[in-house]
Image (cartoon, helix red, strand yellow):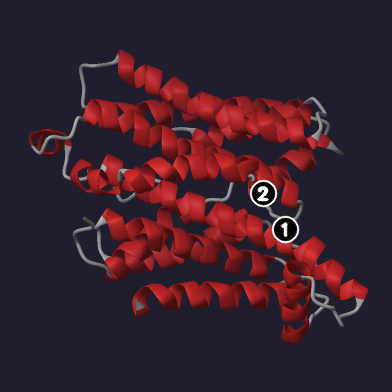
Amino acid sequence: MLPVLLPILGLLALVVLALATGRYSVPVGDVFGILAGKLFGLPVRAEPAMQIVVLQVRLPRILAALVVGAGLAAAGATYQGLFRNPLVSPDILGVSAGASLGAVLGIFLALPVAAIQGLAFAGGLGAVAAVYAVGAAVRRHDPVLTLVLAGVAIGAVLGSAISLLKVLADPYNQLPAITYWLLGSLASASLGDVAAILPAILLGLVPLVLLRWRMNLMSLGEEEARALGVETRALRPVLIAAATLVTAAAVSVTGVIGWIGLLVPHVARLLVGPDFRRLLPASLILGAGYLLAVDLVARTIAPIEVPLGILTALIGAPFFLWLLASGKRGWV
């Protein structure tokens, strides 16, 4: 009970710290008072400006960080186990590239924010659908290897399309918006955004939770899993679709935030082991806390807000190299 309770308490403490910290500091006591007033209708003594900062500015982006971080980490753990590769991340099948192309196209066409997010979501799902169609058409090779190679190829094509749109975009208005979106940020996240992506992320997490014990068998390999009674051809599309749905929903709101789906599952695996029944909840908690901590640094480290993609790479890459140098040889 204690090993489960401590990470949850740590995450809650980080949430309170994020609500209280920023250019406009709010005392922790006032944070609790504002939240209690909002949840239970109790009288609030804090100044109106503090209430606005906590409830309308910081709370939406904190909720978005928790949901997106948890989703990306869970998707990363699923992909790594499914493809039996520690270097796999949620964008291995072109999810991020497809979502980026959809968002860039929406910005290029000067569409509303909701339409941009919708195009990003559809682009992520469409990219993986194309990758899986190629994988299903090519049956002469290892299906896992075929999906990875198809993802690399289609991701390259989508990346070239993004580059073309950046060249054609207005350099004074559209190009800065495209560049900022591709670097990832929670600055514009709202409660409406969280409400929009939460059903898709929960829908994607449900199969991962229900099939978590089968993921242990899938990580053994194709032949071993079939020998143990797992129908891999039917199960793999379900797991890929679930992880893709989570990733596409997250990326559609925040932009491309790298390293979470690659790094966090490694840390969770070192803490709780490779059993997916423990690895999945550990990845959810660590992913939520990691993105929340990075977002807190992003909005307080400099006079202007630093894009999340820059910080996750600066933090994630050295830490990942340290994990490679000090971790165990086996990863499953």
The x, y position of residue 118, in whole percent, is 67, 31
The x, y position of residue 256, in whole percent, is 59, 45
Work out whether 173 lies above or below 314. above
Count of picture labels: 2
**Which residue is the site of mark 1?**
60
Quarter-of-image position of residue 281? bottom left
Residue at 66% from the left image edge and 28% from the top image edge: 119
**Which residue is the site of mark 2?**
194
**Circles 2, 1 touching at the beta carbon (< 8 Å):** yes
- Mark 1 neighbour class, 10 Å CA radius: few under 14, some 14 to 19, many 20 or more: many
For the N terminus, the quadrant is bottom left
Residue at 62% from the left image edge and 30% from the top image edge: 101
Quarter-of-image position of residue 58? bottom right
Identify which residue, 78 or 204, lies in the foreground.
204
Work out whether 127 lies above or below 184. above
Disc 1 residue type? Pro
